[in-house]
Amino acid sequence: MEEQLLGNCMRLIITEGLTANRVSDYTQKTEALFASDSRFDSVVLDLSSTKNIDSVGVTFVIGLYKASEEHNKSFSVSGASVDIMSLFRLMKLDQFFDLNE
């Protein structure tokens, strides 16, 4: 996962699959980010390089949304494939955060 601070927006770019074998690393990085960096007020999860996501990955996205809310930061997902966007909409996650194509 790459982190890019653009103004007051923290862009988190998932460069591999959002699956169980990677989520632990992503979770540690995001927890450290929220604990140490207050220079941003919004979080964008960029999934443009992500081809697959499993249930653990979906749980990670929900957890990242909740962490953003707890730290008073807005949260959105961008660049997700049509299949991932459909999954998020099916799970009604678009009612909680923005899904940008």
Image: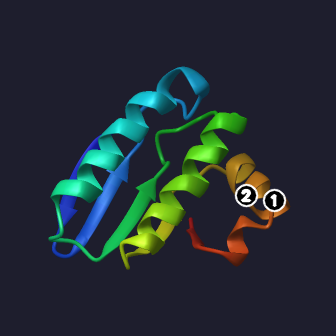
Task: Say if residue 74 shows up in the picture.
Answer: yes
Q: Position of residue 20 (x, y in %)?
A: 59, 26
Marks 2/1 in contact by CB < 8 Å: the verdict is yes
Q: Quadrant of the C terminus?
A: bottom right
Q: Is residue 69 left or right of residue 58?
A: left
**Of helix, strand and loop, which one carries label 1?**
loop
Where's the N terminus, which quadrant? top left
| Image location of residue 71, percent across then percent down | 36, 72
Give residue 53's position: percent from left, percent from top.
Answer: 65, 36
Q: How many marks?
A: 2
Judging by the rendered image, the residue that carries numbered circle 1 is 91
Residue 43 located left or right of residue 18 = left
Q: Nearer the viewer, residue 16 or 61?
A: 61
The residue to which callout 2 is attached is 88
Q: Quadrant of residue 96?
A: bottom right
Is disc 2 surrounded by few (<14), some (14 to 19) or many (20+) residues within 10 Å?
Answer: some
Tell me where residue 52 appears, x and y as whole percent: 64, 33
Residue at figure coordinates x 42%, y 40% from the top left: 27
| Residue 99, label in figure | none
